Image: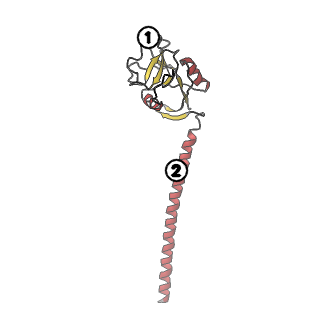
Amino acid sequence: MNIIFILSVILEQTFLVVDAKKDYHRILHRYVKELQNEVHKMNEITDISPCPDAYSLFRGPDGPFCYKFDYTCAKWIDARETCLVEGGDLLIPREDTIPFFASLIPRTLSNHACMNKFWIGLSDKDIEGSWRTVRGNAFSINSTRWSMYHPKGISDYDCALIDVIGNSPIKSASCSDRGHPLCQIFIH
């Protein structure tokens, strides 16, 4: 009887040890998963590193790129030069991304010539009425992103900007007007 009692105690202790090991492995597995998730998050953060200082990452439909709202007040050509010097260009507008960028611009009214106005990579300087991005792609004048009465068919209004004051963000303007550069750098 003593031997049976001792064996049952040993067996019970063995089951407890096995259960403890199972719990330990379950906890260890969960901890490893959490560490893998943290490593994945850290890898995503390092994905941002291709963006220069002051630029933010945007994951667009055509792939990721870096963007920056520059607060230099400049004519369109000078705004573009600001972006080119940094390895980019003015933001190339897309029908589906313009609302996102417009939503980031503070909606403050001011008499300041550049307030709320950001130059984008769009103009009809080469052929009046034929709006093209700085990469040469056509942009529809029927786009719903144009503000009312824009683009204006005035020969001097050859450049485009995002201006959040109004119903739709894209407006045509004279290239000699002043606005801020909205720069974009593609990540390869």
> Are the residues at dot 2 and dot 1 in contact (C-beta closer than 8 Å)?
no
Q: In the structure shown, which secondary structural element does the residue marked by tag 2 occupy? A: helix
Quick check: 82 left or right of 63? right
Q: Residue at x 41, y 20 (%)?
A: 140
Q: Earlier in the sequence, mark 2 or mark 1?
A: 2
Residue 71 position within the rendered picture, expressed as x and y whole percent measured from the top left: 55, 27
Q: In the structure shown, which secondary structural element does the residue marked by tag 1 occupy? A: loop
> For residue 143, which numbered disc appears in the image?
none
Q: Residue at x 40, y 24 (%)?
A: 166
Residue 177 position within the rendered picture, expressed as x and y whole percent measured from the top left: 51, 16
Residue 18 position within the rendered picture, expressed as x and y whole percent measured from the top left: 50, 71
- Of the residues shown, which amino acid type is indicated by label 1? Ile
Where 98 falls versus 123 (above or below)?
below
- Of the residues shown, which amino acid type is indicated by label 2? Asn
| Tally of marks | 2
> For residue 154, which numbered disc appears in the image?
1
Mark 1 surroundings: few (<14), some (14-19) or many (≥20) residues within 10 A? few
Where 78 falls versus 32 (above or below)?
above
Q: Residue at x 51, y 62 (%)?
A: 27
**Quadrant location of the C terminus?**
top right
Q: Read off the residue under disc 2.
A: 37
